[in-house]
Image: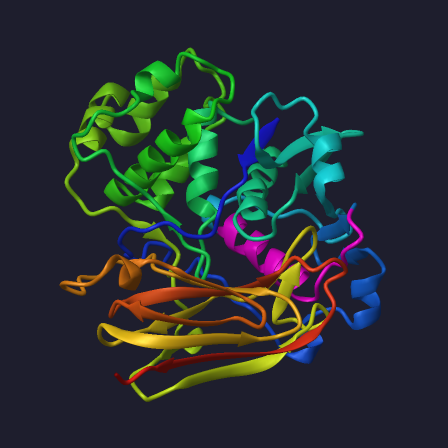
């Protein structure tokens, strides 16, 4: 069984592009997503997926758009084929679905898993972005081959769960004390530490060599044999695994990010004056994704050109706006208030100092039933 942990949507480090052609392409034209009737019946099918939910909340129209696109991106990156369109992979959303499918998982706080039910691979998750993409990596690989050691499998799934607008931030050890890869390989069971160590090492391998070399190793039929993994690694990468671990531990390259944090057409700036964004926050629209406990708009970004003071407001019947200071910048001397992230509930008005940086903006709602609501986000500088 492959599992994924619950994860929040942002962490700070540095962005550098690595996915190349493997980017998220979101179609929001009327013909790309199911109609309202399909959204409300609790079951949605795409070319390769069958999506259901155990919750009372509907599956939002953007969910199948996002997931089918993610599946194609992931399969291309893995260099593995997808299945026939009459053979759907089942994705089940909701806490009950996770409890049922992931009942044999011993880790605490998991957000999803992949397991086999009636000889079929099944994905269960509570979150759309990140967690489902992580599990799709496992699902695509399990449909084509046997899986290797968890530190490799979970690490690769973590790296590939990042896409444009949904970045995954990686930390390299940079010579600091760190859990040792060689010690983790001695344990075949999935452990929490496999995720952080695995994604850092697998990212390093991808950067240091290239994707084809990494996938040739991961797709080698001998990978699941833990007795020969050291020999197999040296055959593919040209050096012993212990030497690769040491090179990774002391590498001075900047921490990478997988997937662009900001999508240009959804990046806004205060340089032109007050910012006002409005529309319908409607689960039946393909610009909104959700299926379990939350619905959300596609992520946005905000450029603040200089240290300043702002008034932020969110007009809506429900929802929360987060303005997250996740991207690196050097705003000079600023206050703790200016550097911290901003959080607003529907109806709130917030006046605070803000640092001249780039921010990720997330609008989401956990209102039961995901009722539609018009929304308006206003951000303006306050002249003192």
Front-most of 335 and 59?
335
The location of residue 262, given as percent across then percent down, is: 39, 66
The location of residue 356, given as percent across then percent down, is: 24, 70
Q: Is residue 351 above or below residue 258?
A: below
Which residue does the image show at 19% across and 63% down from the upper left? 334
Overall secondary structure of the magenta section: helix
Q: Is residue 230 left or right of residue 57?
A: left
Q: Is residue 156 above or below residue 63?
A: above
Front-most of 383 and 281?
383
Q: Quadrant of the C terminus?
A: bottom left
Q: Please name the colour scheme applied to the rendered image.
A: rainbow
Which residue does the image show at 30% across and 44% down from the upper left? 210
Q: Tell me which corner region of the image, top left, top right, bottom left or bottom right, holds residue 47.
A: bottom right
Q: Tell me which corner region of the image, top left, top right, bottom left or bottom right, holds residue 174.
A: top left
Q: Is residue 258 above or below residue 237?
A: below
Question: Residue lying farthest front?
Answer: 384
Front-most of 335 and 268?
335
Q: Which residues are magenta?
A: 55-76
Q: Quadrant of the N terminus?
A: top right
Q: Is residue 29 left or right of residue 137?
A: right
The location of residue 46, given as percent across then percent down, is: 72, 59
Front-most of 376 and 383?
383
Q: Kindly tell me whether residue 226 is visible in this rendering.
A: yes
Let me know if residue 58 is in the magenta part.
yes
The location of residue 254, given as percent across then percent down, is: 20, 47
Which residue does the image show at 34% across and 14% down from the upper left? 183
Q: Is residue 206 left or right of residue 94?
A: left
Question: Residue lying farthest bottom?
Answer: 272
Let me know if residue 188 is in the magenta part.
no
């Amino acid at each position: 069984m492959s599992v994924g942990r619950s994860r929040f949507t942002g962490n700070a480090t540095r962005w550098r592009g690595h996915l190349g052609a493997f980017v998220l392409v979101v179609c929001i034209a009327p013909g790309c997503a199911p109609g309202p009737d399909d959204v409300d019946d609790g079951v949605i099918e795409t070319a390769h997926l069958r999506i259901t939910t155990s919750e009372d909340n509907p599956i939002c129209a953007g969910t199948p758009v996002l997931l089918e696109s993610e599946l194609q991106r992931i399969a291309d990156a893995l260099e593995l084929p997808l299945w026939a369109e009459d053979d759907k992979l089942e994705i089940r959303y909701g806490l009950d679905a996770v409890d049922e499918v992931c009942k044999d998982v011993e880790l605490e706080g998991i957000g999803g898993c992949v397991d086999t039910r009636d000889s079929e691979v099944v994905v269960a998750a509570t979150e759309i972005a990140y967690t489902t993409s992580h599990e799709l990596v496992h699902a695509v690989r399990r449909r084509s081959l046997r899986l290797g050691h968890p530190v490799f499998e979970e690490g690769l799934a973590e790296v590939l769960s990042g896409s444009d607008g949904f970045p995954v931030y990686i930390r390299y050890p940079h010579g600091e004390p760190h859990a040792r890869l060689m010690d983790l390989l001695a344990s075949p069971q999935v452990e929490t530490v496999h995720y952080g160590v695995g994604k850092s090492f697998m990212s390093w391998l991808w950067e240091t060599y290239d994707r084809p070399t990494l996938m040739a190793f991961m797709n080698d039929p001998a990978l699941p044999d833990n007795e020969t993994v050291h020999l197999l690694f040296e055959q593919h990468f040209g050096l012993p695994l212990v030497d690769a671990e040491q090179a990774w531990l002391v590498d001075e390259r900047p921490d990478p990010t997988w997937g662009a944090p900001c999508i240009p057409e959804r990046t806004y700036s205060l340089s032109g004056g007050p910012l006002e964004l409005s529309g319908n926050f409607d689960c039946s629209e393909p610009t909104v994704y959700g299926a379990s406990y939350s619905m959300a708009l596609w992520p946005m970004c905000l450029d603040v050109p200089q240290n300043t003071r702002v008034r932020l407001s969110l007009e809506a019947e429900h929802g929360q706006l987060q303005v997250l200071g996740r991207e690196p910048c050097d705003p000079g001397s600023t206050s703790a208030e200016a550097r911290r992230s901003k959080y607003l509930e529907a109806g709130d008005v917030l006046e605070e100092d803000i640092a001249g940086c780039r921010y990720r903006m997330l609008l989401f709602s956990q209102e039961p039933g995901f009722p539609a609501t018009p929304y308006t986000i206003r951000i303006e500088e306050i002249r003192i």
